[in-house]
Image (cartoon, rainbow, N blue to C red):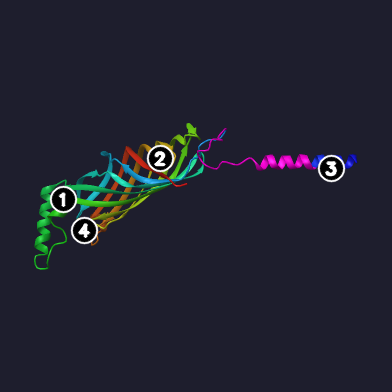
Amino acid sequence: MKKLFFVALSLLAATETFAAKASVRTDTSMSGENSVGASYSDRGSFGPYIEFSNINMDNVTYVYKVHEMPQDISIKGSTIYGATGTLPLKEWFDIFLMVGYQYLDVKHSPRNPSKAYADLADFADMYEDFGDAPIDSNTIKGHHDIHTALFQFGFDLSFPIYTNYNYQLMVKPYAFAGVLVGKTFFSDDTKFLSPLLYGYAYGAGVRVAFHGAFLTAGVRNSHEYFHTYFERKVSETKDGDEFMLDFDTLFQPFISLGITLF
């Protein structure tokens, strides 16, 4: 009899325990009221990207030669327009991708104009009976319209300084670094080939997320490089007709506003 009593008592206790567990529901919503000890977790995001150009000639290194004659250049860059996305792998570690477009206006002029134009006259005489000369006055002095497609891939290290589960709010400063590749397109009537562009970028910013939206702002530094030659050389070697551009941009402000992906 006692044995049956203890068995019945054990079954009753087990039934009550199971019922108590079954009555507890897990709130999987990001705004649930049962959020004691919970925190906002970073999520993947995507949105438009704008960066304001800050190219200073003091940070530009170049070589520009036409028929062995060096020229001076000046360069201006437009605002960068594009899109960016992030994917968090850890609370403190994200990977990101930025795709953008920038226009570069490069003006060039000979360091020794009289010698350059005398050389051009010699070319005109040489090709008088054979058609147009391979260089003209625009090659001696003019400008290049360069359209660039930029792709930046890298990672960021972050530390959320404020998270609120109920309000779905997060503030997270971060530092980032990445590689930069791109393709240039010379749209003017130039003899130079359109080269690939290489470089790297780094910087810092603050990311604020609220429910399904985010806002990111910061500053970005970059190093960009390309080297190109005439499609058909007019000098004895291709190095006589070359354009090498190597420049740094410092503290370019950027902003991105978009949506979280999940």
Position above or below: 35 against 197: above
Q: CA separation, marks 3 and 2?
A: 58 Å
Disc 3 residue type?
A: Val
Q: Amino acid at mark 1?
A: Gly
Identify residue type, mark 2.
Phe
**Along the line of sight, the residue nearer the viewer: 26 or 254:** 26
How many residues crowd around disc 1 within 10 Å: few (fewer than 14), some, or many (20 or more)?
A: some
Would you name the residue on which mark 2 appears?
214
Task: Name which of mark 3 and mark 2 comes first in the sequence.
Answer: 3
User: Badge 4 is on which residue?
Assistant: 191
| Dot placed on the residue nearer the N-terminal end, 1 or 4 | 1
Verify CB contact (< 8 Å) between mark 1 and mark 4: no
Q: Earlier in the sequence, mark 1 or mark 2?
A: 1
Q: Name which residue type carries label 4.
A: Lys
In the depicted view, which residue is nearer to us: 69 or 157?
Answer: 157
Viewer-proximal residue, 60 or 47?
Answer: 47
Report x, y in % for residue 146. Answer: 24, 51
Q: Which residue is mark 3?
A: 7
Q: Earlier in the sequence, mark 4 or mark 3?
A: 3
